[in-house]
Image: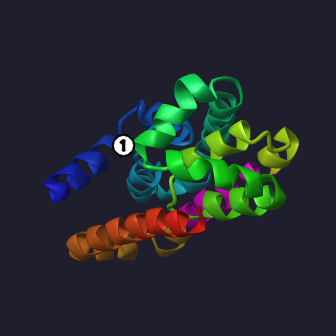
Amino acid sequence: MLRSLYDWTMNLAAHRHARWGLALVSFAESSFFPIPPDVALIPMVLAKRALAWVYALICTLASVLGGVAGYAIGFFFFAQLGEPILGFYGYSDQFASFAERYNEYGVWIVLIAGLTPFPYKVITIASGATGLNFLVFMAASLVARGARFFAVAGLLWWFGEPIRTFIDKYFGLLSILFVALLIGGFLLVGLIL
């Protein structure tokens, strides 16, 4: 099933509206959507390596704008929207103690979470809910998300077709590794909270 989804995504990456899809996924992932933009970024760069930097910029800007939406959810609508979203991911109970420590280390939390496969929406909502300085949040988000997406695009641009062959050959193993890293990110946050 994952293989057919991968093949479908690779074909979709060459579609004329693929950039809008990438922007939409990047925006949504930073505020409420559970799937990271790498799912769209990777096949798009592999399909059109010459546009790697454009795709990374789209991912970065849309992700930061989505982060602003997540921040707004936390800041303005935490009781109505933020708490249910955090509850969906299982973080409601630990949030109170997390909020107390959050602003002290907020810039580092945003930077680290922005670089990793950790669900960034949790951090954007938490930043708004705890009132982390908005300019600090924006700067950290721009640096972290930019570094992440430009690194992914850069590696794919640099290695090109050999990396695509590698992904095609070891897709099952890479899928398991990705899921393990994602679960590990959730567990790590659980330990921190």
Q: Is 90 situated above or below 23?
A: below
Predominant SS along the magenta part: helix
Q: Position of residue 33 (x, y in %)?
A: 44, 38
Expressed as whole percent of the image width and height from the top left, the position of residue 104 reads 83, 59
167 displayed left or right of 133: left
State left or right for residue 23 relative to residue 141: left
**Quarter holding residue 98:** bottom right
* Placement of 177 over or under 99, stated as above or below: below
Residue at image position (24%, 70%) is 171
Task: Answer whether residue 151 is magenta in the image.
Answer: yes
Q: Is residue 151 left or right of residue 190?
A: right
Residue at coordinates 79% horizontally, 61% vertically from top-left?
105
Q: Is residue 19 visible?
A: no
Q: Which residue is mark 1?
A: 14
Taking depth in this image into account, of 129 and 23 the one nearest to the observer is 129
Q: Residue at x 27, y 71 (%)?
A: 176
Q: How is the image coloured?
A: rainbow
Label 1 element class: loop
Q: Quadrant of the C terminus?
A: bottom right
Q: Nearer the viewer, residue 35 or 89?
A: 89
Q: For residue 146: magenta?
A: yes
Give the answer, above or below, for where 77 lies relative to 57: above
Q: Which residues are drawn in magenta?
A: 140-154
Quarter residue 111 falls in = bottom right
The kind of residue on which mark 1 rests is Ala
Residue 160, above or below 102: below
Where, quadrant-wise, is the N terminus in this rendering? bottom left
